[in-house]
Image: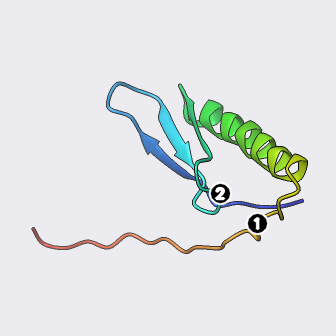
Amino acid sequence: MREFDVILEPEPEGGYTVTVPGLPGCISYGSTHEEAVEMIKEAIQGYLESMAAHKQSLPTPVRREYDRVKIAA
């Protein structure tokens, strides 16, 4: 089993756009957080299958750390 970091960005009109930093161009959308996660899982699977079909080496998952900081503004 492989793990990939994903970024969920809420859209102003509703729903979420999801990207995978370790897989350039792998993007999806879902109306809810849960749907967005399921949709990006399918997108990742398709991305990896396409790479394998084209004899491209599969990427090594990139681990990133994110945090939140507060500043006076």
Name the side, left or right, on which 22 lies relative to 54: left
Q: How many marks?
A: 2
CA–CA distance in space, label 1 to label 2: 8 Å
Specify the farthest residue to the front: 54
Find numbered disc 1 in the image and state the secondary structure of the residue it sits on.
loop
Q: Which residue type carries mark 2?
A: Leu
Crowd around label 1: few <14 · some 14–19 · many ≥20 (10 Å): few
Quadrant into which the C terminus falls: bottom left
Q: Which mark is residue 25?
A: none
Q: Residue tagged by mark 2? A: 23
Residue 2's spot in the image, x, y percent? Answer: 83, 61
Residue 33's spot in the image, x, y percent? Answer: 56, 36
Quadrant into which the N terminus falls: bottom right
Is there a contact, CB below 8 Å, between mark 1 and mark 2?
yes
Residue at the location (65% across, 40% down)?
A: 37
Q: Based on the displayed image, in which of its 4 quarters is residue 13 positioned?
A: top left
Residue at the location (71% across, 39% down)?
A: 43
Q: Which residue type carries mark 1?
A: Pro
Q: Looking at the image, is 59 positioned above or below residue 25?
A: below
Name the side, left or right, on which 55 lies relative to 14: right
Q: Nearer the viewer, residue 15 or 22?
A: 22
Residue at the location (68% across, 34% down)?
A: 39
Q: Looking at the image, is 13 positioned above or below residue 33?
A: above
Find numbered disc 2 in the image and state the secondary structure of the residue it sits on.
loop
Q: Residue tagged by mark 1? A: 59
Residue at the location (32% across, 31% down)?
A: 12
Q: Looking at the image, is 17 positioned above or below residue 8?
A: above
Q: Nearer the viewer, residue 15 or 46?
A: 46
Name the side, left or right, on which 13 lies relative to 58: left
Q: Earlier in the sequence, mark 1 or mark 2?
A: 2
